[in-house]
């Protein structure tokens, strides 16, 4: 039977034996008939919060946190509705949009235009966060586990903070969206490094669909709760990136409601572990590089037997990539065990170590292969 895989912008069709193939995918939820109307309705009747126009004050300075290019968040469709509501109370010159890059690279102008739309790009002030620019950060407190929280100082200075994002299961933070749009999205490198450290990544509770008890998610929650006056606007998406539901209002209450919806629609039980698992990273823009493709591989590992095989189809038009330290970590370790030994040294810290650690842990259990647009010699440098 022929299966169409989400791969890059064009997709990839594979022919598989029908009698030996089980298809595991999220329950398809149709897109909302009128996304803009659903967004307005949610902003005007939010969860555990007053309507956005009542929550805002005329003298507010508004900071809006948005996802970067590595996420399929439809900001170009969400922001016009959100901004129209805000501007009923707060003038445009008091609104700033913050591109929540975390430790990722800055986005190009072309990427930014695709992310937010030409009108928003040309008419609103947009700040790209830089986790490595210590001069742009401010300490706002500590998590209950003791992590010092450094955040984008300009965002912290905004009197009203609006977090936008989409909710999906996350491979070590439980779920995306909500508080993740504060940390790691707008956090300093030091804070992110400790949160994503080897001990936390290695915790069995730091995985798909788990929040409470997950040390990574709990630090993310604590960091976001250090922000007074934060309003949340999250959406859920189907495989065509249509909006299927909107959750707005109180940060934790609305995110919890969205996570419950995603748990019921996106996470599927399987009868047994499989010998071979074929996976993707959901196509463009999520499969832009090998680093991001580890997320799809991590999902496959949850249903692959020990000693089984994972085959990931990810276009990787952005390479391994060359930016960041992920490639360096992989190339300096001769084997997955060698990579893990280095990462788990008591004083070792390097950006992107979390992705290399997760990959190496999977490769201890499974044989992992990558189908991509990259030359074979490049892929082999990543031990795939």
Image (spheres, helix red, strand yellow):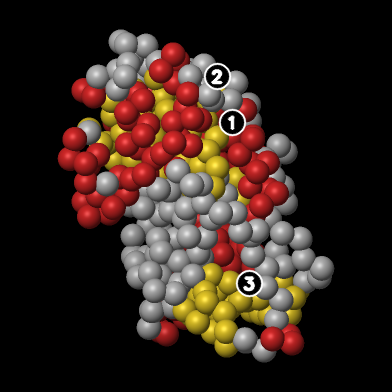
Q: In the rendering, which numbered label is found on residue 254?
A: 1
The relative height of residue 292 versus residue 195 in the rendered view (above or below) is: below
Report the residue at 55% width, 35% height from top: 247
Count of marks, rendered view? 3
The relative height of residue 66 versus residue 71 in the rendered view (above or below) is: above
Give whichever of discs 3 and 1 has the lower sequence position. 1
Q: Quadrant of the N terminus?
A: bottom right
Query: In the image, is 124 to the left or to the right of 254?
Result: left
Q: Position of residue 306 (x, y in %)?
A: 75, 74
Q: Secondary structure at mark 2?
A: loop
Give whichever of discs 1 and 2 has the lower sequence position. 2
**Residue 70: quadrant of the picture:** bottom left
Q: Position of residue 239 (x, y in %)?
A: 52, 60
Please state which of residues 190 and 298 is positioned toward the viewer in this rendering. 298
Contact (Cβ within 8 Å) of mark 1 with mark 2: yes
Q: Is residue 158 visible?
A: yes
Which residue is identified by label 3?
363
Give whichever of discs 3 and 2 has the lower sequence position. 2
Spatial CA distance of label 3 from label 1 is 36 Å
**Residue 64: quadrant of the picture:** top left
Q: Secondary structure at mark 3?
A: helix
Q: In the rendering, which numbered label is found on residue 49?
A: 2
Please state which of residues 251 and 139 is positioned toward the viewer in this rendering. 251
């Amino acid at each position: 039977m022929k299966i169409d895989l989400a791969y890059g912008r064009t997709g990839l069709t594979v022919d598989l034996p029908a009698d030996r193939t089980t298809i595991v995918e999220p329950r398809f939820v149709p897109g909302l008939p009128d996304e803009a109307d659903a967004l307005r309705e949610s902003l005007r009747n939010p969860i555990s919060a007053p309507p956005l126009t009542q929550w805002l004050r005329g003298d507010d300075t508004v900071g809006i946190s948005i996802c970067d290019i590595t996420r399929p968040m439809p900001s170009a469709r969400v922001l016009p509705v959100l901004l129209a509501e805000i501007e009923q109370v707060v003038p445009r010159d008091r609104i700033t949009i913050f591109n929540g890059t975390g430790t990722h690279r800055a986005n190009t102008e072309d990427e930014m235009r695709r992310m937010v739309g030409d009108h928003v790009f040309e008419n609103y002030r947009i700040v790209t966060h830089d986790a490595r620019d210590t001069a742009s950060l401010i300490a706002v407190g500590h998590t209950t586990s003791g992590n010092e929280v450094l955040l984008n100082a300009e965002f912290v200075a905004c009197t009203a903070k609006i977090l936008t994002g989409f909710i999906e299961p996350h491979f070590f933070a439980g779920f995306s969206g909500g508080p993740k749009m504060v940390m790691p999205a707008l956090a300093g490198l030091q804070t992110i490094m400790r949160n994503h450290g080897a001990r936390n990544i290695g915790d069995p509770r730091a995985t798909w669909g788990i929040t409470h008890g997950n040390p990574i998610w709990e630090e993310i929650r604590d960091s976001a709760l250090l922000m007074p006056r934060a309003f949340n606007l999250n959406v859920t998406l189907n495989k065509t990136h249509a909006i299927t539901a909107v959750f707005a209002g109180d940060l934790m209450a609305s995110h919890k409601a969205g996570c419950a919806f995603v748990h019921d629609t996106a996470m599927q039980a399987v009868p047994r572990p499989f010998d071979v698992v074929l996976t993707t990273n959901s196509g463009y823009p999520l499969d832009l590089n090998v680093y991001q493709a580890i997320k799809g591989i991590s999902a496959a590992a949850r249903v692959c037997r020990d000693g089984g095989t994972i085959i990931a189809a990810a276009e990787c038009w952005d390479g391994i990539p060359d930016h960041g330290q992920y490639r360096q970590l992989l190339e300096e370790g001769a084997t997955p065990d060698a990579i893990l030994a280095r990462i788990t040294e008591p004083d070792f810290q390097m950006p992107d170590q979390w992705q290399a650690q997760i990959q190496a842990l999977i490769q201890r259990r499974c044989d992992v292969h990558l189908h991509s647009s990259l030359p074979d010699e490049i892929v082999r440098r990543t031990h795939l």
